[in-house]
Every structure is written in C-alpha cells, then in structure tokens.
Image: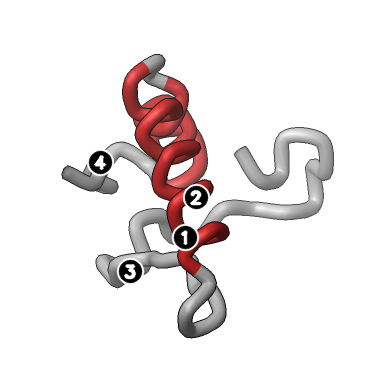
Amino acid sequence: MVGCDRPKLKVVEIGITRKRLGICVGKGNTVLADAIGKAQAALMADGTLPALIKQWLGKGATVPE
C-alpha cells in the first residue's frame, strides 16, 4: 500500500473511481490486440489478474468478465 515505506505519506481515500480501464492499440493492429487478449486470458486463468486487481485497485474493484 502507498506509504508503507514512506511514513510521511498517508492514504486519504481508496476506491476513488469506478471507471472501466482499457488498453489501446493502433487501428488495424490485430496482432497486438490478439496478443494482449491472449495474455489477459492467461492471467485470468491462472488467477494472476484477479490478484493484481485486488492488490492494486482495492476490494471494491471487480474482475472483468
């Protein structure tokens, strides 16, 4: 969590936004879009993506479907 190694910093609010996040690629760059999709699917399958979402976005964040 922010501030763990910097005692002068303090978390003042968590769960600030409910905006959907995305990754942009150039129009027509299907190779990169497919690679990102495959990587995301692998991260979902092995539980890495849900763990990262929970760790960095907080308990109010939801895992994409």
From mark 2 to mark 1, how far is it between C-alphas?
5 Å
Q: Which circle's residue, 3 or 4, is located before the other in the chain?
A: 3
Mark 2: amino acid = Ile
Q: Which residue is mark 2?
A: 36
From mark 1 to mark 3, how far is it between C-alphas?
26 Å
Image quadrant holding the N terminus, namely top right
**Tag 2–tag 4 contact (CB < 8 Å):** no
Q: Which residue is mark 1?
A: 33
Residue 20 x %, y %? 29, 67
Q: Nearer the viewer, mark 1 or mark 3?
A: 1
Q: Nearer the viewer, mark 3 or mark 4?
A: 4
Residue 52 shown left or right of residue 62 in the figure: right
Q: Which circle's residue, 3 or 2, is located before the other in the chain?
A: 3
Q: Which residue is mark 4?
A: 63
Residue 40 x %, y %? 42, 40
Q: Which circle's residue, 1 or 3, is located before the other in the chain?
A: 3
From mark 3 to mark 2, how far is it between C-alphas?
24 Å
Residue 47 x %, y %? 38, 19
**Tag 2–tag 1 contact (CB < 8 Å):** yes
